Amino acid sequence: MKLAGLAAYDGRVTRAAQTLLVCQGFDGGWGLTLSSVSSIVNTSEALAILRAADVGGAPARDALAYLAEAVERHCRPRQKGGRGENTRFVCFGLTGLLRYPEFFTQPEVAETAAWCVDWLDRHRIEHGWPEVAGIDDTSLHQTALAVLALSRLRDALTALGPGLTLPGGTDTSILAARVEPLIGHGLAGLLYHRRAGGAWGWRTYVDTEPSPSKTALCLMAVAAAAGSRRGHPAGGPRTWDQPHEVGGVDGRPQRLRPAQIVTQAGQWLLRNHHRWETFVEDDKDVQGTAWEHMAYALGVQGVLHAGGNPHDRRLTRAWRLMNDLWDPEAGLWNEPGASGQRATVRAAYYTVTAYEEARLRIGRLSMAEADGSGAVRLEDAPPDIREISLMQDGRQIVVSTAEASATCAVSQRLFDLALILHPAPGGLAVPQIAAALHVASSSVPKYVQRLNNAVADAFGGKPIKLVVPRQVIGGQVGGSGGLVSGYALAARVDRVQTEDTSQSRTPGPLP
């Protein structure tokens, strides 16, 4: 299946980087729009775009210098000339400083990173970090951002090696020893608030609805905290396979491995793709300012980060939306939603990170196929089909599972395929099906795939198969012999209804 926008992505991200370079502020930063005042958040986002386009040099150094100067100043209380003690300033600032780890040993970069660690250490609360310092209310958004930033810092320190003295006198081993427990603190808080279904809520309260954006962010934070660890600089063990307590907030904690937690969150996002594939999700944690997550891109990134396939049918609408948001005149991606169609750094950042995740995931899938190891795929187990009803009036097929029922109207050829299979609970050989449909044997798999796709679409893209492969006896019409390839319906047909709705019959169950 075609991934909308991927073929054009390389040219677009290069053009987006050029647009940002032309509009870079005199202070080295960027704001939400190309004419907005510089901010820590948008400068960090712009650096991610430049990095994706392989742009470095003076523009990157100027942006890093802006962040290094702005983080501490912006985090002052408003009455002292700052923009407020917002956790996101520290998290986005630290993440932005680490977009170019080759510059980490620059004095202002290393010193500001150490200052961010100090700030996060001083202002942590139970189960994570608040939206604003001094408020005793954990924010899932800020806690996930903190874990992501600190994990990135840990990995940068690991790459530098232990015992290296950074500008300002900070030792890499000492700083890493301070970072590690902060990551553990944030990870424990995120896992405490995870719901039983695998998602995270809008807020930390149990009675709030699950949030696609928070789930994607928390998924990536859990993976960053546990999955990328190769033994921290102090020589500690890997933790990816160690079980953690999850879900204490609802009083029913369980112990799960991080890989399971990430997979379950990715599966929840796939099952609920209709809730985020075209949406901009406002963050109700943030006080005093409108804060929006580009859920359509965050959801895709979360699914892929958990091991999903970029070509999964359930991601199609989100990819199409991102492709359509490209604005060739502005040289940037537009932002949908209540704010209107306007080119923003925020929309470009979310879109670029989704496409970058797709490129990374496609590369891993290709490598797995090349070395024969098989790719790990994020898929729900297909729901069991309980009943199938064939309605000749309108060529409708009604399929029921334990959780839902769906009706799909299909072409005459596809409906005939279901009709042919229903009297044969043990299945029919491919030549038998071909003869009944008056097509070549080589065309049968094509019609099976089309019928299964129609049913999957009726269930919102879930991997439900109406027709399944089956080994049957004999390969010729009326013949006999050994086992050969064939197909059968996945469940008994509950009803075959003719044009006259008073006539119906119920075939016997599958053996």
Image (cartoon, grey):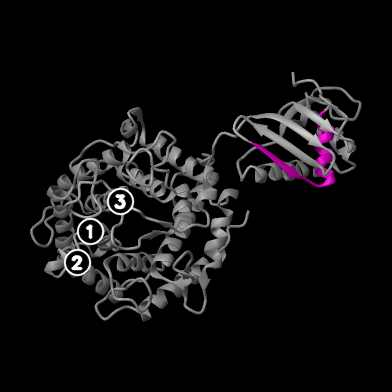
Q: Is residue 299 visible?
A: yes
Report which residue position mark 1 lands on. 86
Spatial separation of the CA atoms under disc 3 and disc 2: 21 Å
From the image, state whether disc 3 or disc 1 is nearer to you.
Answer: 1
Tell me if label 2 and label 1 are in contact, CB under 8 Å. yes
Residue type at the position of mark 3: Leu
x and y percentages locating residue 403 in the rendered image: 59, 32
Residue segment shown in magenta: 405-422
Tell me if label 3 and label 2 are in contact, CB under 8 Å. no
Report which residue position mark 3 lands on. 148
364 sits left or right of 468 in the view: left
Q: How many marks?
A: 3
Residue type at the position of mark 2: His
Residue in the picture at 56% in, 67% down: 324
x and y percentages locating residue 296 in the rendered image: 49, 56
The answer to which quarter of the image holds residue 256 is top left
Badge 2 element: helix
From the image, state whether disc 3 or disc 2 is nearer to you.
Answer: 2
x and y percentages locating residue 421 in the rendered image: 81, 31
Number of other residues with Cα within 10 Å of mark 1, as a class: few under 14, some 14 to 19, many 20 or more: some
Q: Is residue 305 above or below residue 241?
A: below
Report which residue position mark 2 lands on. 74
266 sits left or right of 447 in the view: left
Instruction: Give the mark nearest the N terminus, 3 or 1.
Output: 1
The foreground one among 442 and 99 is 99
Q: Is residue 29 above or below residue 403?
A: below
Q: Is residue 430 above or below residue 53?
A: above
The foreground one among 346 and 488 is 346
Instruction: Give the mark nearest the N terminus, 3 or 2.
Output: 2
Number of other residues with Cα within 10 Å of mark 3, as a class: few under 14, some 14 to 19, many 20 or more: many
